[in-house]
Image (cartoon, rainbow, N blue to C red):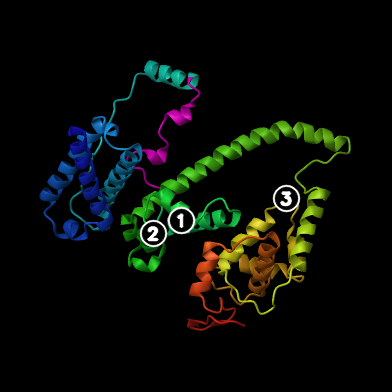
Amino acid sequence: SNTSSKALKFESLLGLTVAMANHQLHALLYRGDPDRNRSLFKRVADAWKRIFDSNAEEYVSKDLHSFAVYYCNYFQSLLKQAKKEYDLQCSYSFNYMTKKKAAPVAKVAAASAGAASAGLSNENAQLKPWEEDGWLPMTKSGKQKSPNQIRNELQKYIDQCKADGSSTQTKIIERMGVNSNTFRRFMNPKTYKNQWSATSNGTYLAAAQLLAEVKHDADVAKKTGKRKSAAASVNGSKKAKTGGEAGSFPSKSDKSDAQALIDKIIAQDLPEDAPIYDSCPQVVAKIKAFLAQDGMTKAAFLRALGNLNSNSLARFVAGKKQDQCANITYKRAYTFFEKQRLVEGKAKSAARMRNECEQIGGFSTRKQSGSWVFARF
């Protein structure tokens, strides 16, 4: 039928575009004839333009349609960067969608009013910046964020989600719409001799868009929280004048609950020679999440770790990868959180199971010059 024929053309064109984006076209951009390249890119872009100008969602799913827009946008950004990255004497474009003319002010106002009456905000009725064509992640100074910056921000976000249980790495990869192999290549900086080559990996733009969305949601929540706290501050000041609790200090009940939890954890039995199956960054993430609980204080946590020195804790939290494996905080904190897992009756996480398979005998707490030793102690 005509519908199935259109769907087949859509999928074939999408396959070509994804292949061009993922395989990066190094040889073609380096040695290809610029005029022929322009002709090729224009034909593909024009084909997409005809599809997007029609009602493509009538014969393909909404998710597939969105996926196609994402990859077209990604390939467009690759070509924009190609001149600088490959030191080319020419530039390329990929105009895959017809730019819509700005509507008159009166029509925009009417549309906004219609959206509001339908229960939609102006913000939801418009594209977010990271959803627009040609968007790239930028620093506050106006420079494009490097792959190393995006990689570090993404890793922090993944660690945070793991610690608070809000998501997993697998789900985050699925949300970005990249495959695990592409993700692993991007997250390993040794894959690229020149870090900017990593912009050709689909994870770069997908991660940047995800991080921009996460930051936007956090900013909106923060503003909402400020409005709520401003309204509550009046009640707080009244309570303070009448002897009630006010301010941001943990209440006595919160502190007592936190201490009760610590006491339960400390009382849990665990062999002293139990191997470590969490990396330093994983333990750091757990420390941050634990200290973020209501009523929990750093002083109480340090006491729970055997009156640990605060400087040792600070150095461990500030460490990179396994460079703080010899820090006494590593062993003590891991043991503490392993006891907590047993107290709460939680199953081992996928990351924990993977570490048990990959790190036979557990992570080492000794650092040797030039090499790492993975052994039980």
Residue, x 21% and y 57% (percent of image)? 25
Q: Quadrant of the C terminus?
A: bottom right
Q: How many marks?
A: 3
- Residue 268 in the image: state x and y as whole percent: 74, 68
For the residues labelled 2 and 1, the Cα–Cα distance comes to 8 Å
For the residues labelled 3 and 1, the Cα–Cα distance comes to 29 Å
Q: Between tags 3 and 2, which lies in front?
A: 2
Residue to which mark 3 is pinned: 294
Q: Residue furthest front?
A: 1
Q: Residue flagged by tag 1: what amino acid is it?
A: Thr
Residue to which mark 2 is pinned: 180
Q: Residue flagged by tag 2: what amino acid is it?
A: Ser
Confirm or deny contact between disc 2 and disc 1 (CB under 8 A): yes
Residue, x 65% and y 67% (percent of image)? 338
Say left or right for 177 vs 235.
left
Write down the region rendered in magenta: 118-143
Q: Earlier in the sequence, mark 2 or mark 1?
A: 1
Dominant SS type (magenta) = loop
Q: Nearer the viewer, residue 345 or 335?
A: 345
Q: Nearer the viewer, residue 28 or 350?
A: 350
Q: Residues within 10 Å of mark 3 (few under 14, many from 20)?
A: some
Residue to which mark 1 is pinned: 170
Say left or right for 272 vs 5.
right
Relative vertical location of residue 162 with respect to residue 106 in this rendering, above or below: below
- Residue 369 in the image: state x and y as whole percent: 51, 84
Q: Earlier in the sequence, mark 3 or mark 2?
A: 2
Relative vertical location of residue 339 with respect to residue 370 in this rendering, above or below: above
